[in-house]
Image (tube, rainbow, N blue to C red):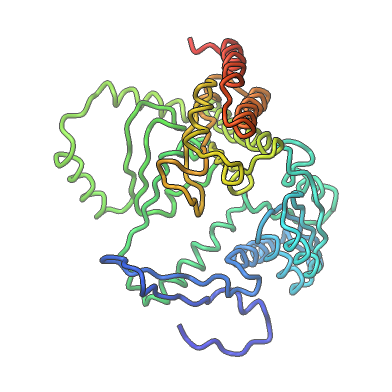
């Protein structure tokens, strides 16, 4: 990387961040590098997509001189947008949930942004949900631009066309690594159009064919790389696999056919809505959801401050008819056999017919059991009460 020349614009300082090789950790045959994105003027990698999305809007005419930029965010994207709006002469309005750190709100206001604070206890589809509110405000301001980062393709393209090539250039294009993405858990959400598709960016993508994809049990390896395809193909057959089971292949094909339907897309959408409802219900009951919520089918609940382990909570909830897994959380002080968290998924119950009304009940069932366990170190009576409630709820949604 060349020497950074003097500049008269803060915008020129976005990108071209240092790349640091890690030297004091055993990385085996590989070299490990850290991209120091905190060196961007806004303090995070989000300066890049913020700049890129604004420039795309300028180029396609959707953002006019002196216009209003509107976005919903609970993180650093808002800071990046506010910074660039200030430097480019735009007004900026950021809608944030009330759980957002006060320091970030102060930071946004210091950059000249108007901050609208809304509720964090509602899910997508509610008029006060931060993204829905931002879109609504934008519809009432003629000439404004709703950035919509989660649905804005330029958000991803910023890294595909900028961050990625920058890293390659810093490494003198001497990269012999391949990008592999495992989407086993969320492939059904990709197929249903509610989760970004990694196939356009990865050299190899692996997935199960069950889980959220809801087909027959098995797996897939996907690649558009000719040389890798030949090696993977020969390694699988005859290297690892014998004769295929044609009835299993037929079952998968039937499942893939379902994944092409409008009904499947509705199912995928409901998975996410149900997970968000479950997360918000638990938040309202005083529980901490890792990352503050969810954008997929998984809700990871931290019990670190509740004086209960993940393994204990898993058993108590299982006794109450509520299936979950003990799960580690970031910087978990407990070993993986015990953990400080539990993980819930919404795909199976969504397939059964549960909607947000039922998942609100489920969230309260979970909290009832955990509350009693935390307060009394035992929840046997509550477990039985909840088990009966779960049984009655499931009767309304028979499997057969």
Q: Quadrant of residue 1?
A: bottom left
Measured as percent of width and height from the top left, residue 161 is found at 50, 65
Q: How many marks?
A: 0
Measured as percent of width and height from the top left, residue 153 is found at 58, 54
The residue at 83%/60% (across/down) is 114
Q: Height in image: 246 above or below 229? A: above
- Classify residue 192 as left or right of residue 241: right
The residue at 75%/52% (across/down) is 96
The residue at 55%/39% (across/down) is 308
Q: Height in image: 117 above or below 394? A: below
Q: Which residue in the rendered view is the most extreme toward the front? A: 376
Measured as percent of width and height from the top left, residue 21 is found at 39, 75
Q: Quadrant of residue 393?
A: top right
> Closest to the observer: 2 or 116?
116
The residue at 42%/26% (across/down) is 257
Measured as percent of width and height from the top left, residue 251 is found at 34, 23
């Amino acid at each position: 990387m060349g020497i950074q020349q003097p500049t008269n614009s803060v915008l020129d300082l976005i990108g071209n961040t240092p790349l640091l090789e890690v030297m004091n950790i055993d990385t085996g045959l590989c070299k490990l590098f850290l991209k120091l994105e905190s060196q961007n003027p806004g303090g995070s990698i989000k300066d890049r997509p913020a700049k890129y999305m604004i420039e795309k809007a300028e180029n396609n005419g959707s953002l006019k001189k002196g216009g209003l930029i509107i976005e919903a965010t609970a993180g650093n994207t808002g800071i990046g947008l506010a910074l660039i709006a200030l430097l480019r002469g735009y007004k900026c309005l950021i809608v944030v949930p009330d759980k957002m750190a006060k320091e970030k709100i102060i930071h946004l206001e210091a950059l000249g942004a108007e901050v609208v604070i809304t509720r964090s206890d509602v899910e997508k589809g509610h008029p006060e949900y931060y993204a829905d509110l931002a879109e609504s405000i934008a519809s009432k301001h003629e000439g404004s631009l709703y950035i919509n980062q989660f649905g804005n393709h330029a958000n991803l393209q910023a890294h595909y066309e900028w961050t990625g090539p920058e890293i390659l250039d810093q490494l003198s294009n001497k990269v012999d690594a391949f990008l592999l993405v495992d989407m086993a858990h969320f492939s059904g959400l990709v197929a249903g159009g509610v989760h970004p598709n990694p196939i356009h960016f990865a050299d190899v993508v692996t997935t199960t064919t069950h889980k959220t994809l809801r087909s027959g049990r098995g797996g897939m390896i996907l690649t558009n790389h000719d040389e890798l395809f030949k090696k993977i193909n020969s390694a699988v057959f005859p290297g690892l696999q014998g004769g295929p089971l044609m009835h299993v292949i037929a079952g998968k094909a039937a499942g893939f056919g379902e994944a092409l339907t409008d009904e499947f897309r509705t199912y995928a959408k409901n998975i996410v809505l149900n997970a968000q409802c479950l997360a918000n219900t638990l938040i309202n009951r005083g529980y901490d959801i890792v990352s503050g919520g969810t954008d997929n089918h998984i809700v990871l609940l931290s019990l670190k401050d509740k004086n209960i382990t993940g393994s204990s909570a898993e058993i108590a909830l299982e006794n109450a008819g509520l299936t979950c897994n003990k799960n580690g959380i970031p910087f978990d002080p407990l070993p993986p056999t015990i953990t400080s968290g539990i993980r819930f998924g919404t795909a199976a119950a969504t397939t059964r017919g549960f909607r947000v009304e039922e998942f609100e009940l489920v969230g309260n069932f979970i909290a009832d059991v955990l509350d009693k366990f935390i307060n009394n170190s035992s929840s046997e009576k509550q477990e039985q009460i909840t088990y009966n409630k779960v049984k009655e709820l499931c009767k309304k949604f028979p499997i057969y």
